[in-house]
Each structure stands twice: as C-alpha cells, then as structure tokens.
Image: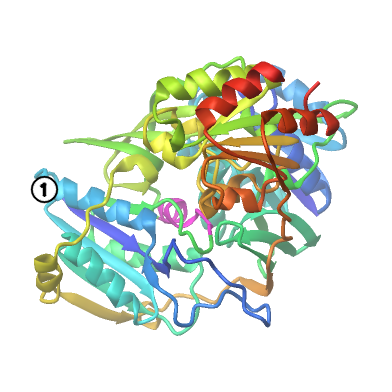
C-alpha cells in the first residue's frame, strides 16, 4: 500500500506529530510525505531525512502560506490518485483538512486511530475514550487521522527521501487568512512535553494560576496545561486545554493541581505514565487514576512542593 | 439570511457510557439522551444571529431515529423557527449525513450552516468539514467567535498554538467550539410554544442516496483500566516518593 502522510510543521521544523504519523503509516506500507506551505524548502529537506520515507512531495506557494483547508484539500485529492491511504496527525490542522479530503474522495474517514490491526482495520477511541472501537473499512482508499500519543516517533534522521515538486492547485477563493495569536512560550509544547503541570478551576484566578503553577513547572522543566474549567474561567488561553476536545497528552509525569477529573479531562491525559494529583476533595475522580495523590489545600501544598523539590 | 443548524441526539454528557457485555457497542437502553453539547452551542449562535437582526430564519435538522424529534423540540424551545426530522432505520455515518445535508442545503438555500465541531459519542469531528467539501464552501472550523458583515464572516478559530482568524465569503460552514457562547436554557413558556412550531418529517430513503455504511464495527471494548495508586500523607512523603520514582532529582 502507498501511503501519503501530511507533514505538520511550523514553517521551519517538522513537528513530532508528523513522526508519530509516519510510524502509523509504515504499518500500512510505503510512506510518502506531503509538505505544503510557503518557503518550506527547509522543512522538505528535514522531512526527506525521516527514516524510511520515499518521495517527499512539496507544494510551495504563497496560496499555501497559511495552510487553509479549502486550498490544500484539492491538492491532496489530486495526489491521492497515486496513493492508497492519506494519514494526518489528529492536530487541529489535520482535523480540519482530512474530512474535507475524505468527502471529496467519497471515503468515510477513520478519526484518531490508536492502532493498525490490519490494512483495513483500526482501533479508535469513542465516548471520550471510555470505549475503544475496532472498525473495519470497506473503502478502497483510506483517510485516517492519527492519535500521536498512541504511536512512537519515527527517527528524524537517516532517511533518504526524494524531493519532488508538486504544482499548486491555487487559491479557491473560499477563505482568507486574517491573523493569529500564537503564544510564544519557552516551555515544552504540551503534546511532546516529558512532564506537564496542569491547573484547574480551584486555582481561583489567572494571577494565582501563574503564581502557583508556573514556579512548579519551572522546577520540573514542565509544560503547562489546564482543565476546561480553568480555560473557560479565563485563567489561561484556549491552547492550554487538555481533554476530550482539547489536547490529548501522555507525558512521563502529569501533575494535576486542583483538577477534579471530569471524564472529559481524563480523556485527554489518562495515558500519562505517572499521574500525581493534588486536590482538597478526597473523593475527586482524579484520585481514581492517580498513582500518587495528596489531599489538601493546594495553596499551601504547591508552594511547599515547589520549595522542597 | 437563513441559517441551517444540524443537530444530533447523543448520550447525555453527564452519563458514564457503559460497554455492552457482548462488546457490540455502548448500552443506550434506558439512559438519558440529550442534544450534543457542541450542537447546543451551534443552535445558540444561530438564535443570537436572529436576535441581532442578522439571520431571518433558523432551521434545525436532525438525522437519525424518530426520537431525535425530542432533540429538535429542544432546539425549537431555545428559539429555532422550524425543524426537519430525517428518519433512518440504519445507522448513518458522517459521510452519509453530509450527503443528506447537502440535499437539504440545495432545498433550503441557507447562507450559513452552523454545526457542532464534533459529537461526543463517536468523537469523529468530520461532518462540518465533509459538508463544506461536498458543497465547495469555506469551512470555519473550531469557531470561538463569529462576526458577520454584509459580504461574509470573520471567524476566530481555536487552533493548537492559540487562535487564528480567517475570513469567508457567503455561503459558508461554521463548526462551533466550546467557547463560542454559553447556550441558554429553554424556558417553560418557550417549551410550550415550541410544541406548535412546524416540524417536517422525511425519510432518509427519499433522498435516493447511497448511505450504506463504509465502516463495520467489529467490537467495542473498555479501555485498559488504570489502577489507582496511593495517597500520601504530606508534601515530604510526596517528595520522597518522587525521588524514589526518579521524577524529582
């Protein structure tokens, strides 16, 4: 089977999610890549170095600068004439693009795959991860999004991919990029962080979230996340949200501070290797998944913990 | 401007899903069903557009079993003007739903279709994008803010790194994220009034589309259970354990 993997990048580097998607694709057959953007020669070079890849298709055009799904989907559809499966990481850009591609190919997409059981059979989470479904597709071509936490990263070097230029399919006139607010942070990115400290509504305000969570995260070299309640309350921006509809993470260590553990939150972090929970309610559901739990007042515990670590 | 809002009846988000003993799916017998929470946000947004004088009519549509009419009544009680119920004996996948919706769009000619970004049962996150692809319309996915101007809409979208703002001409698709708005509760008088609002009933077979499912569910299982660990007495014990586990150095 010839697979085509969507390369998620930030304009200069290939994101980890791509490497994990390459691993999923390699279980199906040959892995070819698609790099789309404007001024992405460096990304294409890096992508060609990923272990085991064949052709790296590169579409470099000003119309692709912001990766609008309306403009990228026709390009993918064209390339799918020569491939059997399209795989994208289940990131926001992958989730926006893949179903549009699937509809144009008349294929029923399989979202968020956790494993490859065969060339037409996959597992995926349903009901916020409270159940795992095994599904078999009868579509000849496959469109899949891949849950990053379920696959190891492919090696980012040692590959000998061959770069081929693809003609732009141009601007479809359906969408225009206006602007973005992307927070610059020196912290590890959540989906690839080794340690995450996450705060909940119990922190009470954005100021206290920063005062308590940030120093602990500094001490642990951690990424910072939050529950939906903390994001809704405005303590932190939306990209901090971990859960069913936010980011799915599986770090080595997850420290949940003042998070009760609603199923929607657990859906985003319960595959973490070690979970540590600090909460004043000893019956909070978070303790049912935590390896280490400490019941008490987080306003006393967190500063003390930060000091003593 | 007419706004179409497709909605889905799902297991209530407060109910813990239970896998059936035979592994064929989730047990939905005698459990509370509700409107998909993201669809409530979509309905709310459409109603606000009408209250703001931007939308002239809000039409809600649901595709599924006959009981989906309860969900449509809820949307009517929130303030939608009329409803379309499309019944289907067989399970319809997002691709099939998108095809039926394309046919309804051709009949109703809305300028805007607002959907929830995903349903909390199958967690597919597909229907809005698929419909946009089939119609060759713009797709403002994961919207947290929608501003309408005479020639189109400007939408702030929740993306992995933060927020992105894009602009779309009409007609267009919007998929609602969590922070687009806070849906209202239907008041008792409005629930009563909703009973008199029009609801058209159609059968999916009328659309003469091939809706045969492409995916077969071979089995549904509980995820590997995570066993709870231990509670520690104080910070000192926590620090000691973290050292023992090699987490703190």
**Residue at position x 19%, y 66% in the image:** B76
**Residue at position x 61%, y 14% in the image:** A186
Q: Is residue A251 left or right of residue A159?
A: left
- Give the camera-side residue of A46 and B18: B18
Percent x, y of residue A268: 59, 46
Q: Quadrant of residue A18?
A: top right
Percent x, y of residue A82: 71, 49
State yes or no: residue B101 in magenta: no
Q: Is residue B181 left or right of residue B25?
A: left
Classed neighbour count for the residue bearing mark 1: other residues with Cα under 10 Å, few (<14), some (14–19), many (≥20): few
State yes or no: residue B128 in magenta: yes
Q: Is A225 placed above or below A146 here?
A: above
Quadrant assignment for the C terminus of chain A: top right
Find the magenta span and give its range: B123-134
Report helix, strand or loop for mark 1. helix
- Give the camera-side residue of B72 and B206: B72
Any part of residue A11 in sight: no
Q: Quadrant of residue A157?
A: top right
Percent x, y of residue B79: 16, 60
């Amino acid at each position: 089977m010839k697979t085509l993997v969507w390369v998620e990048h930030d304009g200069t580097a290939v994101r980890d999610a791509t490497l994990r998607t390459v691993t999923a694709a390699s279980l199906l057959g040959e892995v070819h890549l698609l790099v789309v953007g404007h001024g992405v020669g460096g990304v294409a070079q890096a992508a060609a170095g990923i272990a085991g890849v064949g052709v790296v298709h590169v579409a470099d055009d000003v119309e692709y600068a912001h990766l609008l799904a309306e403009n990228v989907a026709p390009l993918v559809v064209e390339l799918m004439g020569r491939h059997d499966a399209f795989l994208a990481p289940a990131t926001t850009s992958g989730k926006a693009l893949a179903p549009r591609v699937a509809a144009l190919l008349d294929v029923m997409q399989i979202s968020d795959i956790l494993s490859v059981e065969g060339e037409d059979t996959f597992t995926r989470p349903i009901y916020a991860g409270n159940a795992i479904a095994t599904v078999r597709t009868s579509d000849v071509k496959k469109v899949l999004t891949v849950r990053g936490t379920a696959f190891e990263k492919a090696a980012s070097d040692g590959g000998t991919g061959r770069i081929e230029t693809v003609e732009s399919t141009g601007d479809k006139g359906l969408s225009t990029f206006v602007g973005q607010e992307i927070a610059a942070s020196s912290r590890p990115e959540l989906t690839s962080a080794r340690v995450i400290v996450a705060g909940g509504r119990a922190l009470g305000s954005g100021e206290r979230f920063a005062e308590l969570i940030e120093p602990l995260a500094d001490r642990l070299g951690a990424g910072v996340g939050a529950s939906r309640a903390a994001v809704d309350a405005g303590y932190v921006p939306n990209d901090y949200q971990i859960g069913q509809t936010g980011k799915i993470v599986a770090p080595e260590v997850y420290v949940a501070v003042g998070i009760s553990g609603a199923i929607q939150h657990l859906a985003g972090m319960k595959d973490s290797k070690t979970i540590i929970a600090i909460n004043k309610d000893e019956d909070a559901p978070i303790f049912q998944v935590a390896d280490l739990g400490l019941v008490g007042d987080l306003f006393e515990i967190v500063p003390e913990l930060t000091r003593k670590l | 401007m007419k706004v179409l809002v497709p909605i889905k009846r799902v297991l209530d988000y407060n109910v813990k899903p239970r896998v059936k003993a035979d592994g064929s799916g989730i047990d939905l017998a005698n459990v509370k069903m509700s409107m998909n929470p993201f669809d409530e946000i979509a309905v709310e947004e459409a109603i606000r557009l009408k209250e703001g004088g931007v939308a002239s009519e809000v039409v809600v549509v649901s595709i599924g079993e006959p009981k989906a009419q309860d969900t449509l009544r809820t949307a009517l009680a929130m303030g939608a003007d009329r409803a379309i119920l499309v019944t289907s004996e067989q399970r319809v996948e997002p691709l099939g739903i998108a095809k039926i919706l394309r046919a309804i769009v051709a009949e109703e000619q809305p300028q805007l279709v607002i959907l929830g970004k995903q349903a909390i049962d199958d967690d597919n996150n597909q229907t809005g994008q698929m419909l946009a692809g089939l119609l060759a319309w713009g797709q403002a996915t994961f919207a947290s803010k929608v501003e309408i101007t005479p020639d189109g809409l400007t939408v702030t979208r929740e993306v992995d790194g933060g927020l992105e703002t894009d602009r779309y001409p009409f007609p267009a698709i919007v998929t609602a994220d969590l922070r687009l708005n806070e849906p209202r509760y239907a008041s008792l008088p409005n629930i009563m009034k909703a009973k008199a609002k029009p609801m058209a009933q159609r059968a999916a077979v009328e659309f003469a589309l091939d809706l045969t499912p492409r995916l077969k569910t071979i089995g549904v299982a509980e995820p590997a259970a995570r066993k709870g660990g231990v509670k520690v007495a104080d910070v000192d014990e926590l620090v000691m354990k973290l050292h023992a586990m090699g987490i703190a150095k």
